[in-house]
Image (spheres, rainbow, N blue to C red):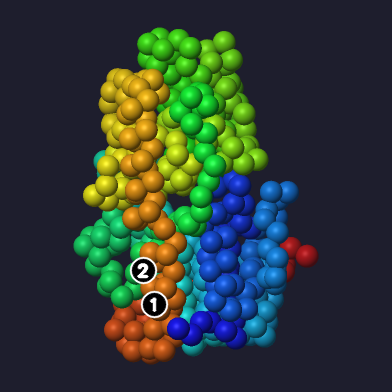
Amino acid sequence: MKGLENKQLLIIGFVWPEPKSSAAGSRMMQLISFFKEKGAKITFASTAVKSEFSEELIGIVCKQISLNCTSFDVFISDLQPDLVLFDRFMTEEQFGWRVAQHCPNALLMLDTEDLHCLREARRLEVLKNKPFDLNNDLAKREIASIFRCDLTLMVSEFEMELLQTYFKVPSFLLFYLPIWVENETLDLPSFEERDDFVFIGNFLHAPNHDTVIYLKEVIWPFLSKKFPEAKLQVYGAYPTPKIKSLHEPKLNFFVHGRAESSFEVISKARVLLAPIRFGAGIKGKLLEAMQFGTPSVTTTIGAEAMNGDFLWNGFITDSPEDFVEKAIELYQNKSFWMQAQQNGFEIIKNRFSKDLFENTFLEMVLDKFDNLEKYREHNFIGSMLIHHFLQSTKYMAKWIEEKNKAKY
């Protein structure tokens, strides 16, 4: 099978990838590695400022770009990419019209990470007691972005189905590509060599922030009463003052901040706790728990779209009382724990192995290149949205640009 040799790929990143901070960072690095392996020449551009934890992108051209500035027009006109990958719909909103104007024949691809409008509807339902409503303003922006692109990568089969049935997005615009796991043998600690419960997650991500507060205020009082020697180790990049304030060693509740290695902290723990109340996509922490042989207790939303027809690597429950019971049972019962660990390995092997997706993804990208005009003819809504998007966003951007000039 031919690859992507001599194809010029531009990735417009929402942020510079931090694979040690978030699943989104790991996902982006997987995509970069895939396209690099297939021979593409890659340029990564972002308006964000690099942090000390940003990954070093070896062998890739890096470019700092600006919003509402004609310098991007010059940049992309000179680059003339064959493929543009937008990292989340917000970057497509910001730069899609400029790409369409200067590179009309470039293949446009969107990586959603998760369906933001679904996550927002669930957040408002849980935290603001609002009725669940998918017809929110975020959905209007996000679905429009999906229609404007030639291919959108989805990490969740549930969200794939939702887009097709509820929002009527044609199937040829979508491709299921979850975070995958490399086939490798890991040296994992045994049941006896592991201690403590663990949680890990980037605290810039609202579901993680809420989960740890819920753990401390609702789950932990029950769990520590029934199992006084239990300890919970909480790790995560960018902890807020609120999260830091939850650190309470006398209650065996420890907040450590960023973990240098997710493998180290998850594989040494006996059980991962993730009572996730809202969110979307697949959860990187739960995928890593399976990979590192650590059983987990989570919620229906936490496990959504992950295990398919396979048994979970632990327990799924939405009841706080049941959550505590299952967590203690899994922690103390070796036979349950061993079976749960094996269930996780089966899920990884049959649903998230890289071998399951690598070739079909390449085939899809090549097919899009070869038949781009035909696909676009069948996406009238997309072409209509691009037409109006070019006009409205273009002149708004130019107004902002002129306004910015007037400041100096």
State the residue position of label 1.
364
Image quadrant assignment for residue 246: top right
Position of the N terminus by quadrant: bottom left
For the point 35% across and 22% down, the residue is 333
Task: Answer whether residue 386 is visible to the viewer in this image.
Answer: no
Position of the C terminus by quadrant: bottom right
Find numbered disc 2 in the image and state the secondary structure of the residue it sits on: strand
Residue farthest left in this picture: 165
Q: Is residue 313 left or right of residue 2?
A: left
- The amino acid on which the numbered mark 2 sits, given as a three-letter code, is Phe
How far separated are the C-alphas under marks 2 and 1?
A: 8 Å
- Neighbour class for label 2 at 10 Å: few (<14), some, many (≥20)? many
Measured from the top left, where is residue 44 in percent x and y?
63, 69
- The amino acid on which the numbered mark 1 sits, given as a three-letter code, is Met
Task: Answer whether residue 261 is visible to the viewer in this image.
Answer: yes
Q: Is residue 229 depicted above or below 147 in this figure?
A: above
Tag 1 or tag 2, which sits nearer the N-term?
Answer: 2
Observer-nearest residue: 120 or 23? 23
Observer-nearest residue: 214 or 232? 232
Task: Give the number of the disc on residue 175.
Answer: 2
Q: Is residue 283 left or right of residue 86?
A: left
Measured from the top left, where is residue 133 in percent x and y?
28, 48
For the point 37% across and 11% down, the residue is 226
